Image: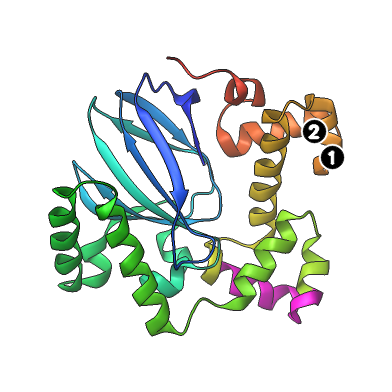
Amino acid sequence: MIDGAGGRVGGVYREWGAAGVPGAVLWGSVSGGGETRVLPDGCLDLLWSSRSGLLVAGPDRTAHLSRSAPGDQWIGLRLPPGTGPAVFGVPAEELRDRRVPLADLWGRAAAEVTERVEAALAAPGDEAAGVLTWVARDRLRAAGGPDPVGAHVAARLAAGATVAATAAEVGLGARALHRRSLTLFGYGPKTLARILRMRRALDLARAGAPLAEVAARSGYADQAHLTREVRELAGVPPSRLLAPATA
């Protein structure tokens, strides 16, 4: 999730579906310069940056502040919670709160992906984004698909289920679910639940619900609890996140 509260001025950002990678989202941006606040979402991203090349963005526990110069370009494939480890071949906890060059994970194989992306950038349309999708799709097939526990746990926690109830549904004890979650999401289920609850609350607020109602519907004790949680995870209060972005 990306938010303009960090100080981004201008720029263009868009998202669209990634065919063949269930639940994944492609996105592209051209920066207007400044700082962008990227909120935690339990996801891992495969990124191409005009400045840094191919990167892997690990799951963040708190907001990541991305600084760009005017005209910097980004293309990304955001993988749904629990899918990234099957694509990148490492546990999510090894990438937590990090931005890692793809070559550090895949070695020489990353050079082929870089060549394909750079060649596609010269073509019209979204060919470069298609390369990222193709890479993820092939890696998922080779891995036999993502761990199905990841999608189930993320879906139940996103819907507001408790960690205990979710563990029971997937047939795991509390410690086993915690270990599995570190591998799949980069952090334990309680942290993932907090992050997904914040996302659910912000979606409701952006749809026009008052914050007091948002807090009640999202499972917070009250509006003050909502504000504290958002501030801890996003670094700013809800009012700052919900303010219109600077044009």
Instruction: Tell whether label 2 touches label 1 (CB within 8 Å).
Output: yes
Q: CA distance from mark 1 to mark 2?
A: 5 Å
Q: Is residue 59 left or right of residue 152?
A: left
Of the numbered discs in the image, which one, if any, rests on residue 91?
Answer: none
Location of mark 1 (residue) = 217
Element carrying mark 1: helix
Residue furthest to the top in view is 247
Element carrying mark 2: helix
Indicate the quadrant containing the C terminus: top left, top right, bottom left or bottom right: top left
Q: Nearer the viewer, residue 77 or 154?
A: 77
Residue 18 x, y percent position in the rendering: 44, 58
- CA neighbours of label 1 inside 10 A, class few (<14), some (14 to 19), many (20+): some
Q: Residue at x 15, y 68 (%)?
A: 112
Name the kind of residue labelled 1 in the image: Arg
Residue 38 x, y percent position in the rendering: 47, 38
Location of mark 2 (residue) = 214
Q: Is residue 245 left or right of residue 57?
A: right
Magenta stretch encompasses residue 184: no
Does residue 25 show up? yes
Name the kind of residue labelled 2 in the image: Val
Q: Nearer the viewer, residue 80 or 219?
A: 80
Numbered range of the magenta stretch: 168-182
Residue 28 x, y percent position in the rendering: 35, 42
